[in-house]
Image (spheres, coloured by chain):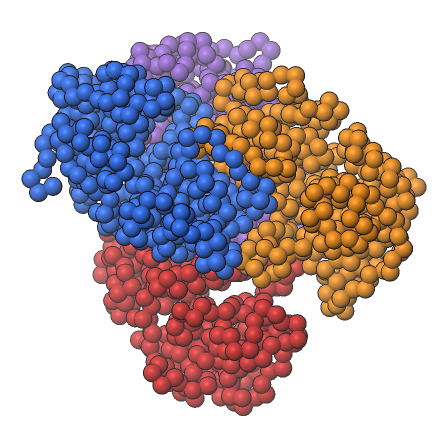
Chain colours: A purple, B orange, C blue, D red
Amino acid sequence: MKALRKTRPERGAQLESVSIPAIAPDEVLVRVRAASICGTDLHIYDWDPWSASRIHPPMTFGHEFCGTVEKIGAEVTTVAEGDFVSAEMHVNCGHCHQCRVGQPHICQNLRIIGIDLDGCFAEFVRIPARNIWKIDPAIPEHYAAILDPLGNAVHTVLAGEIAAQRVAVTGCGPIGLMAIAVAKACGCSTLFATEVNPHRLELARKMGADEALNPKEIDVVKRVREATGGTGVDVLLEMSGHPTAIRQGLQMLRAGGRASLLGIPGQPVTLDLLSEVIFKGATIQGIFGRKMFETWVQMTALLRDRRLNLEPLFGEQLPLSSFPQAFELLLSGQAGKVLFYPNGIPREG
Amino acid sequence: MKALRKTRPERGAQLESVSIPAIAPDEVLVRVRAASICGTDLHIYDWDPWSASRIHPPMTFGHEFCGTVEKIGAEVTTVAEGDFVSAEMHVNCGHCHQCRVGQPHICQNLRIIGIDLDGCFAEFVRIPARNIWKIDPAIPEHYAAILDPLGNAVHTVLAGEIAAQRVAVTGCGPIGLMAIAVAKACGCSTLFATEVNPHRLELARKMGADEALNPKEIDVVKRVREATGGTGVDVLLEMSGHPTAIRQGLQMLRAGGRASLLGIPGQPVTLDLLSEVIFKGATIQGIFGRKMFETWVQMTALLRDRRLNLEPLFGEQLPLSSFPQAFELLLSGQAGKVLFYPNGIPREG
Amino acid sequence: MKALRKTRPERGAQLESVSIPAIAPDEVLVRVRAASICGTDLHIYDWDPWSASRIHPPMTFGHEFCGTVEKIGAEVTTVAEGDFVSAEMHVNCGHCHQCRVGQPHICQNLRIIGIDLDGCFAEFVRIPARNIWKIDPAIPEHYAAILDPLGNAVHTVLAGEIAAQRVAVTGCGPIGLMAIAVAKACGCSTLFATEVNPHRLELARKMGADEALNPKEIDVVKRVREATGGTGVDVLLEMSGHPTAIRQGLQMLRAGGRASLLGIPGQPVTLDLLSEVIFKGATIQGIFGRKMFETWVQMTALLRDRRLNLEPLFGEQLPLSSFPQAFELLLSGQAGKVLFYPNGIPREG
Amino acid sequence: MKALRKTRPERGAQLESVSIPAIAPDEVLVRVRAASICGTDLHIYDWDPWSASRIHPPMTFGHEFCGTVEKIGAEVTTVAEGDFVSAEMHVNCGHCHQCRVGQPHICQNLRIIGIDLDGCFAEFVRIPARNIWKIDPAIPEHYAAILDPLGNAVHTVLAGEIAAQRVAVTGCGPIGLMAIAVAKACGCSTLFATEVNPHRLELARKMGADEALNPKEIDVVKRVREATGGTGVDVLLEMSGHPTAIRQGLQMLRAGGRASLLGIPGQPVTLDLLSEVIFKGATIQGIFGRKMFETWVQMTALLRDRRLNLEPLFGEQLPLSSFPQAFELLLSGQAGKVLFYPNGIPREG
């Protein structure tokens, strides 16, 4: 089969022919319909220091996808050939402390398909049966391809109360934009989005932000404080990972508020813990992955009920062979979610 | 001033002229614009056994209203003459165990304006300053008149997770109908409403119920179980107080689900605690009043953001003098929320 | 091997020679050191209506035990031969809604070893590897034999706040008595125990109850209300399943309190929902089994730290062949926890 | 009366004769029996930059105390002359967002008696009636004098689950030491304390720490990780405010753990948010003051039940006039809690 692989410890990727993966008795082979490119894939393509330390070529990358079950292992009973599926690509060990106390998403021995194991930028991908998520037929294919990042957004938004809460979203990349849609769908009150990229600010408005603010142009903390009668927002959803945005977000947060941090800082961050956390009695939550499988249940409900319009997020639909174009587009910062179709692009896509 | 009063321990009410209430230094006098009739007021009018044991004539009843501040006491700083306000009519003592641990809504020494103290079916009503709630100007007057029951609905819906949850609402009186609107506004998934009155079932659909079911016509438990793949709903909002509906609601609830009970049973209720609560690991919450003032903050946000369309709920707008017509209409079960205008009906009402 | 079995649908049991169970690749064979008799086993022995409807002879019963691993299946990596272990005897399906949202203890397809599958009143018992719980070496053997009911107690006590809370325990059978010890170990404040059996009341005092009250002798609700300044207790741990005790417990509970129900009512229970739950804003929790495996982590910590003195609970130590004596002792209501030693009684036991 | 006052913007304090405070109708005058010196008082005495920016001389400082009610205002009904009392010295406004949603301890307009208003280092202190806390007669006088810092400790420990949890306490000043006692009293599992001062480490052991570790001598993170099987602690109670201790504490914390921060950093703190918070799915809570009045209820229960032995914490008992000795002792870092007795030292103290 064709697979997009990282074969050498350097920038770029290679489209190769490799064997279709063999599956164990508790595994499933999935024929990939659509796969989406994550920011992490850009890092792997670009071979940044994180990639160099974590990725071991040769390997196939990609971890956002949907497809149909091609074959099931001998012990598999919960999914059948032909089922339309996606998968939780974080594979937990099942026996560490976190796995035993109901927190498998922060397993101590987590392996990630597409990072530690061969991923979905290929015609077929091998998945443990218990990680398979069957997709409700009401959910369109292109939405099914991005459940992994949508799950990040849903996990972040629903990590605490959201209905009737005033919200700030700092950082409007794809997951930040999805978080805006999710928060509005769940009854949040005034939502302030901050972002330095004007194109993304415009998307933030389309996704439902009440105010989309550019910190390069105005004092966003002052504006949010004013607009909330001096109190600040009840909830911060931090999706940028940028130290300045994190600090601004915490300054916007009201005393007693909740800050949920999903964005990935590239370096240690200096915080005024005293004023912004301790004296405020604030709660800061680290958010990682998706709850297994509460988050999947939640996002299935939101999508099936047509609560989320994610159309503005989508960009090009390409064959795997167009990968150089796909990555360069995304690295330019101008594209929406780009989808690969390793087994062919659907006619009406 | 004119006031609708219960002057004798018997069915009915009397419209009388009484003195405008004098206020204490920490109290406020409010000129009533619109007052709404609650089911409790029907009991008082009808003089049922509960009323006979609780109400001490002569007194003015009514506890749902909005109005403008006419006069403030010498110590009052948080509200000014002319402000458009409503009020939390449950007056807590401030020093019992519950008041001291952040649960003033279940104060041990609670007094209720319109039941224990003279109420709002009058041109003016006297309110402790700390019970006053200033109304956001974006909220229309007729909505402002029903914040008390809307608060019951918001308190019930938001007493646990609601986004992406499957919900059953048993009982579609005014508060049940409001709960449907609130749950949908807060991102709930499939919502099943049950009710024996066909008119109310129709309203349930208008308010957003996905399925409005009549237990006289179908096996509602079976239908809800089928529609949820055998699992049941995640959340029960019990708004009827009827023993059969309570039992059906619990049978619809999934293992691990949440049942929030607001409806007032007229008698002890026999429950299959073992199957419906214990073996299910279910959580049952008693809901009373409104959280002071979290619920008020929440409903203000929902209304200001125009998340709730409550128009289908409203019925007649009448002067106080039409009280016999108002009560008979409501006792017939056919009317929506009837509003009194003690100081005159607005032209464009 | 020798096994105590229910071979016929009638009162009693039979000690038989049967084959040692064969294990699947993901299972473990455990040599039973000590097994404890649960109230459920008495029902099975006595062949009450519940047993007649649920138990399918021939089968080996018993579900509280500890032992050493004799043999592991080919795929098992988390436990080794010779390990000292107990097990969660509730076997969840892994794929129903509850299993997927982190509530496997209330799995829709739960099977129980010793009820639905052959149990531990035998020299050997077969257990799925993921249900095995390795026992900290600091925990004595006889304590290790009763982790199943201790887990019920820990699950009930820690289902909400307990430190500095006033507590009522209604029903002082073995699990109620353990709950007293657990609640005191976790910093509860005044603990009231109610029980009609004087011997058990005496044990309640030994386990740490501040007041052990007999509802046959005094008005327990009045006493608890008086002793709490009229407020009531913050937490009710209902361990009896008796309708009167459940009602008394709820009457003792303060407005805003938590009632956790573990005791198994033999019939529907009539409750004054209005006064005792709804107007009180109380929370009622059904408790079933043990959280998998949060509860096991918690009880391991409590036992390893020697926080619990359970010695007063233990009764006779007997070989399997003395089963008639064991069951008659327990059915008389006078015995503590009776332990079977299917592979021989330890010298210094 | 005699009062210890800050009369000039410079190091030191002055013992002066001033008028006994006049009280408003909703206030209480308390005759101070014992007052305790807080770290904040040392800052005020020492006139550090924080003091210079916050304190406005002339004023009487001191905010930890107990005493007897000397006189009550005309409207006061909840406390009587002669009552033995302490007080919550944080005076909330009652009408900001936080006050209205049940979080008065983080009021936006908070004033602190002893900082913003005249404090308790005097023969008498004036307190709003609703801030008065009546002391259970079972609580000894010297314990009653330190409820303010004990409340900080209780608030921190009980801000999440504690029973059966492994705990790290970083920083063993008086509040850290109290937190150790509280955590153990509430059933925590292994407790690791870290502190650089050997005298305080010794006290940490006396208060119940299982391991008292000096970061100057060993790699405390490595030790805690080893002792927890590589997992880390479930709960971090950060009581030092020191950046290194905060970072070490977070490194000790397990994925999914809770970090409650009470210690006051003197400057911004640089954190590895990605590894220690985000990827870990950790929760960080800022802790400020005491919950009003949940914390007071909790600490009353713990003290009345004699769950806490705080004796090792106490140091000298002095008249107000010995204030130079008291402050120099404390600034040397060697003393325990020093108590002033403005109305005379009790004979058997």
The answer to whether residue B171 is above or below residue C177 is: above
Farthest residue toward the left? C347
* Vertical comparison of A144 with D265: above or below: above
Q: Quadrant of the C terminus of chain C?
A: top left
Q: Position of residue C61 (x, y in %)?
A: 24, 24
Residue C334 horizontal side relative to residue B32, left or right = left
Pick whichever, D92 or C228, lies toward us: C228
Residue placed furthest toward the right? B347
Pinpoint residue C171: horizontal percent, then vertical percent.
Answer: 37, 43
Q: Position of residue C342 (x, y in %)?
A: 14, 29
Q: Quadrant of the N terminus of chain C?
A: top left
Identified at 47% across, 45% down, the residue is C248
Q: Quadrant of residue C44?
A: top left
Task: Report the front residue among A99 and B279.
Answer: B279
Q: Residue at x 39, y 72 (%)?
A: D140
The residue under the point 46% across, 86% down is: D343
Residue shown at the point (44%, 51%) measured from the top left: C220
> Residue A33's x, y, as percent?
48, 14
The answer to whether residue A268 is seen in the rendering is no
